[in-house]
Amino acid sequence: MTIWDTLVGQRPTIDALEKAVAGHGMTHAWLFTGPPGSGRSNAAIAFAAALQCDQGGRGPDCPDTCHACHTVLAGSHADVSVIRTQKLSIGVDEVRDLVRRASLSPMGDRWQILIVEDADRLTDQACNALLKAIEEPNGRTVWMLCAPTVEDVLPTIRSRCRLVTLATPTTVEVAGFLQARGIEARLASYAARASQGHIGRARALAFDEDVRNRRQEVVGMPARLTTLGRCMDAATRLASAAKDEADAITAELDAREKTDLDAAYGVVERGRRPREYGPALAALEKSQRTRAKRRHLDVVDRGLTDLMSVYRDAIALATGAPGELVNEDIREQVQTIVDSSTPELNLRRIGWIFAAREQMLEFNVPVALALESMMVALKAPQR
């Protein structure tokens, strides 16, 4: 096992980062880009571990018993800070806190490393605060930003960073990764295809039957969109299932945060609420609502990606494109869509799904309304 094991199909990237660890091309600011699930944040964290390790992450005890590697990968290293958000954006206060840490000397004898996982979610004020810190770096500070594409980061910031571009791993590479972790070949192949190169999604599909069942429900929708009533029903089911899944994910965390807040203000022990408790509780509940909305949109977005994969398969099947279908297990349903449509129509359908996604994520259109409009547009044409 090495610190790079989670980076599937990224050999060129690993080689470049190892050279930087050895002192060839090292710089104070890095921008990791790549499609969702390609491992941007994993690459940044592995790179941070290698930089903090006296042996560059290649020693005989790395990463299991090596203190530097182990603590960085576990998220407990004193000189490595990771900012990740469950909210829709990263605000200026969070970035200013990072900037203050960046100005300090590391506690150890190596680097002060600051990783921003969702740099594309930085607000304008946050970007301005970050830019000043990157323009005037501390000699032993390293910034690592992660974003889907370079266009998601301000030109003034990305021009000061060394770019690291990750690729989408192949189905074979993802399947091999899963098999190495005990998943049998057939299930690993299914999860690799269905995830479309998203490592986290592949893990979930391989290890969780409920995740597989929810996906089967979504990819089965296109073949059933034959009437207006079925379209409205599909939209309702997708929105409801996404909300239930998002609520299940956030409910436990919300309860734990509330318990911690009560303990911090002595509400449980003293049986009364101090004056400062009310504003703190209001701020916590606001943060939790924002996180719940982000999680709901993330789950819906994943469902839209699965829907698009069906129409992508229909285009591939109709045009005789080589290779396996993403949804090889429902080939008959995909063939039904092919028989009742054209590649041009299915390409437009993918565009309508993208439009619904943009309405929800960019223009704050209610999820149910956007999904209803989209499902009606996707309806099979009357013969």
Image (tube, helix red, strand yellow):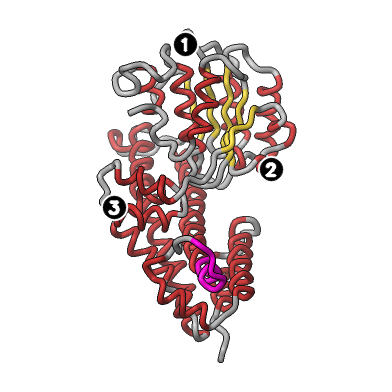
- Disc 2 residue type (three-letter): Glu
Residue labelled with disc 2:
151
Residue positioned most to the right: 156
Q: What residue appears at the point 53 percent right and 25 percent down from the top-left corner?
A: 17
Q: Nearer the viewer, mark 3 or mark 1?
A: 3
Residue labelled with disc 1:
107
- Disc 1 residue type (three-letter): Met
Q: Is residue 60 above or below residue 86?
A: above
The magenta stretch is 311-322
Q: What residue appears at the point 55 percent right and 33 percent down from the top-left corner?
A: 116
Residue 55 percent location from the top left of the image:
41, 13
Locate residue 104: give its quadrant. top right
Residue labelled with disc 3:
185
Q: Residue 226 has which mark?
A: none
Dot 3, crowdedness within 10 Å: few (<14), some or many (≥20)?
some
Judge left or right: residue 373 versus residue 242: right
